[in-house]
Amino acid sequence: TPVYRKGTFLYGYSRAQKQAREQNRVILVEGYFDHARLLSLGFEETVAASGTAFTENQARNLMGMADRVLVCYDGDPPGRKASVKVARIIMAQGGFPEIVKIPGGMDPDDFAGENGTSGFEALLENAMDPVTFCISLLDHQPGSGYRRVLVAQKLLEVASSASNPLVEEELLAKVEGFTGFSRTALLRSSEDRETETVKRKVPEAEKWISSGDKTLLRAATAGNLLQRDFI
């Protein structure tokens, strides 16, 4: 509705603001039961994604609450995949989130219920950056040949989600250290992927460019005008 849109708000946002400022951290969970459990244990800096797909608006609201953002989704494969997706959305908005790895495929509600406040606090303190989290999910070293290339490409996708160049640099260093590929090779691979993405979008863009605009673009190209003159 115009009054309440799930993709904009974070469940528990108002209540969490004060504690998030004092602790300088905010905990993001996926479900309402997870949120209720953590609140009952004193983690009042917890918010939930309102039971919907995480959005850019929610990412910006989350980043505005505290410097340290902890993504704490379920510990099963779907939950871990969702954690990485959420982290990439936050990084695209300029943030540097950490991901909490819950063992045994448990969800935050169950883990907190079994281990209490101190056990859950210890889990939070061991949160990882998105690339380190992804590496921790691998059951083997990168190896060689196509396996090594594949692992590097997947990790590079995560690192390249960062819009903040300092965050990207930090994550690229971890990809480099784990895979053994040089920074130069990683950057070239990232640039090639971006170029390919742009190429795929060009035919789609041609559908809405008018004939007059095309003429102007051809004239600009023929005249060797700088692209910045049209921005």
Image (cartoon, rainbow, N blue to C red):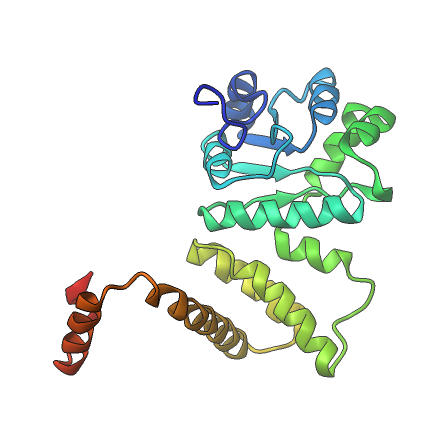
Nearer to us in this view, 197 or 101: 197
Task: Estimate the x, y position of residue 81 in percent, counting from the top left.
Answer: 70, 50
Q: From where the camera sits, is residue 60 visible?
A: yes
- Quarter assignment of residue 101: top right
Nearer to us in this view, 64 or 208: 208
Count of marks overlaid on the render: 0
Is 140 situated above or below 23? below
- Quarter assignment of residue 137: bottom right
Nearer to us in this view, 17 or 76: 76
Residue found at x 76% / y 32%: 108
Residue found at x 35% / y 64%: 207
Q: From where the camera sits, is residue 128 visible?
A: no
Is 41 situated above or below 130? above
Task: Estimate the x, y position of residue 213 in percent, counting from the top left.
Answer: 19, 66
Q: Name the quarter where the C terminus is drawn.
A: bottom left
Task: Estimate the x, y position of residue 141 in percent, counting from the top left.
Answer: 78, 70
Is 44 situated above or below 70? above
Residue found at x 68% / y 43%: 127
Residue found at x 62% / y 31%: 27
Task: Estimate the x, y position of residue 119 in percent, counting from the top left.
Answer: 80, 30
Nearer to us in this view, 140 or 161: 161
